[in-house]
């Protein structure tokens, strides 16, 4: 893969990443409130995602992708944290 192809390949892989709210919250011990913050949704939305059968709704693909990316970040936190700090510093300098 050439250097020019890598960004496109990364985006294609990103577009294939999905993780359900149930799997994400179970894996990381995430509560309704934290999940709402991660996905930028209301707490009531996360209650519907994780609630009982009567009120259950499925999370849309964009939210499942957010959870998959968050899962990847958490799984690789030791390596990713310094990169996130640098990214945040650059953003603040603008």
Image: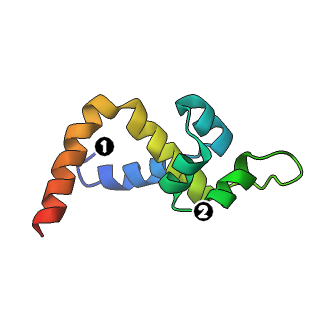
Compared across the picture, whether 61 is left or right of 75 comes to right
Query: Of circles 2 and 1, which is in front?
Result: 2
Badge 1 local density, few (<14 within 10 Å), some, or many (20+)?
few
Viewer-proximal residue, 16 or 81?
A: 81
**Cβ–Cβ under 8 Å for marks 2 and 1:** no
Query: How many labels sit on residues?
Result: 2
Residue at 48% x, 38% y is 71
On screen, residue 94 versus residue 35, left or right, reads left
Which of the two labelled residues, at mark 2 and mark 1, occupies the earlier sequence position? Answer: 1
Q: CA–CA distance between discs 2 and 1?
A: 41 Å
> Foreground residue, 50 or 23?
50
| Vertical position of residue 87 compared to residue 42: above or below | above
Image: 31 above or below 4: above
Q: Is residue 72 visible?
A: yes
Identify the residue at horizontal 36%, vertical 31% (top origin).
76
Residue 40 x/y as whole percent: 51, 61
Compared with residue 25, is residue 90 higher up or lower down, i.e. above or below? below
Describe residue 59's horizontal placement relative to residue 90 as left or right.
Answer: right
Residue holding disc 2: 42
Residue 93: x and y in percent read 10, 65
**Residue at far right of view:** 54
**Residue projecting furthest to the bottom:** 94
Quarter holding the N terminus is top left
Q: Secondary structure at mark 1?
A: loop
Occupied quadrant, residue 52: top right
Q: Residues within 10 Å of mark 2 (few under 14, many from 20)?
A: few
Q: Which residue is mark 1?
A: 1
Q: Position of residue 27 (x, y in %)?
A: 57, 30
Q: Residue shown at 12%/70% (left/top)?
A: 94
């Amino acid at each position: 893969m050439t250097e020019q192809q890598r960004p496109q390949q990364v985006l294609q892989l990103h577009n294939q990443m999905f993780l359900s709210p149930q799997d994400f919250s179970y894996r990381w011990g995430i509560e309704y409130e934290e999940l709402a913050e991660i996905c930028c949704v209301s707490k009531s939305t996360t209650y519907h995602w994780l609630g009982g059968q009567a009120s259950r709704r499925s999370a849309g693909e964009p939210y499942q992708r957010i959870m998959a990316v968050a899962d990847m970040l958490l799984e690789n936190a030791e390596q990713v944290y310094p990169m996130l700090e640098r990214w945040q510093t650059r953003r603040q300098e603008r």
